[in-house]
Every structure is written in structure tokens, then in C-alpha cells.
Image (cartoon, helix red, strand yellow):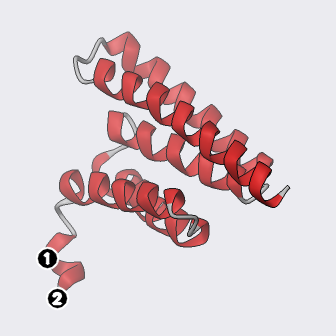
């Protein structure tokens, strides 16, 4: 029932999954967080389309998750795809891009602080 109910609601479910994934990353539950984020990314690809600001945000957050796991190849792929889609969106001059762009900058800063804290703690 749950899957049928939310199937057409990716515009609501995608940001929710991205937020849950981000929280899991911040709690150190990286593998679980990446699964939530991949669910959001797949939902955007199949239902909404990839030219969406929230899709870019999901890709950026999942890139940080992969970086936290030490998988720099996947992190770079996700980050490059996010940059590519963001460039397309900026050409279309969508008003919601400024909000996503600013949130990415602040999250990347917080994500880097988290990664440095983890490296110091475990390192």
C-alpha cells in the first residue's frame, strides 16, 4: 500500500528521502543514508526528471556520503553529475536554483566539517 500511495508523489517523497539521508549521514549511519539518497535519486530519474533542483541536492548529499565511506570515485561521479545538471538549470534561469545553490554551499561546508571531525576522531 505504501509504495502504491507514494508512487506518484516524488515531488514530496524525494525531498523527504534526501532529508532523511542527510540526517543519517550526520548521525554517522552512512550506508543507511546513502540508501535513502539513492531512493530519492532513482525516484527523480523515473518520475520527475533529472532537471530538478532537488535532484541536484540529492546528488550532492550522496556524494558526501560516498566520500565519507572513502569511495572517491562514486563521490566524484555524483558531484560531476550534480554540477552538470545545475549548469543546465542555471541556463534555464529557474528561481528555485538560488535556494538550492545556497543550501549546497552551506551543506558542503557542514559536510566537510563532519568529515574532518571523523578523520580526527578515527584518524
Q: How many marks?
A: 2
Dot 2: few (<14), some (14–19), or many (≥20) neighbours within 10 Å?
few
Residue 73 is at least partly visible in this image: yes
Figure quadrant of residue 57: top left
Q: CA distance from mark 1 to mark 2?
A: 6 Å
Quadrant location, the C terminus = bottom right
Q: Nearer the viewer, residue 44 or 20?
A: 20
Q: Nearer the viewer, residue 109 or 75?
A: 109
Residue 52 is at least partly visible in this image: no
Which structural element holds mark 2?
loop
Asked if the residues shown at circle 1 and circle 2 are in contact, with their CB atoms under 8 angstroms apart, the answer is: yes
Dot 1: few (<14), some (14–19), or many (≥20) neighbours within 10 Å?
few
Q: Which mark is residue 46?
A: none
Indicate the position of residue 40 as horizontal and vertical percent values: 39, 58
Given the current orientation, which residue lies at the most extreme bottom position? Answer: 1
67, above or below 100, in the image: below
Q: Is residue 68 left or right of residue 86?
A: right
Identified at 59% across, 65% down, the residue is 30
Indicate the position of residue 64 as horizontal and vertical percent values: 61, 46
Mark 1 — residue?
A: 5
Q: Is residue 90 left or right of residue 67?
A: left
Mark 2 — residue?
A: 1
Q: Nearer the viewer, residue 111 or 97?
A: 111
Identified at 18% across, 70% down, the residue is 6
Indicate the position of residue 48 as horizontal and vertical percent values: 28, 48
Quadrant location, the N terminus = bottom left
Identified at 47% across, 36% down, the residue is 107
Given the current orientation, which residue lies at the most extreme front position? Answer: 121
Amino acid at each position: 500500500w505504501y509504495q502504491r500511495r507514494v508512487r506518484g508523489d516524488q515531488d514530496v517523497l524525494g525531498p523527504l528521502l534526501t532529508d532523511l539521508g542527510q540526517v543519517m549521514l550526520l548521525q554517522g549511519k552512512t550506508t543507511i543514508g546513502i540508501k535513502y539518497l539513492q531512493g530519492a535519486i532513482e525516484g527523480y530519474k523515473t518520475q520527475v526528471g533529472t532537471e530538478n533542483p532537488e535532484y541536484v541536492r540529492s546528488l550532492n548529499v550522496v556524494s558526501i556520503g560516498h566520500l565519507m565511506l572513502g569511495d572517491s570515485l562514486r563521490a566524484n561521479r555524483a558531484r560531476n553529475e550534480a554540477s552538470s545538471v545545475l549548469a543546465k538549470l542555471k541556463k534555464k534561469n529557474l528561481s528555485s536554483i538560488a535556494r538550492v545553490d545556497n543550501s549546497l554551499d552551506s551543506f558542503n561546508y557542514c559536510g566537510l566539517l563532519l568529515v574532518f571531525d571523523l578523520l580526527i576522531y578515527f584518524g
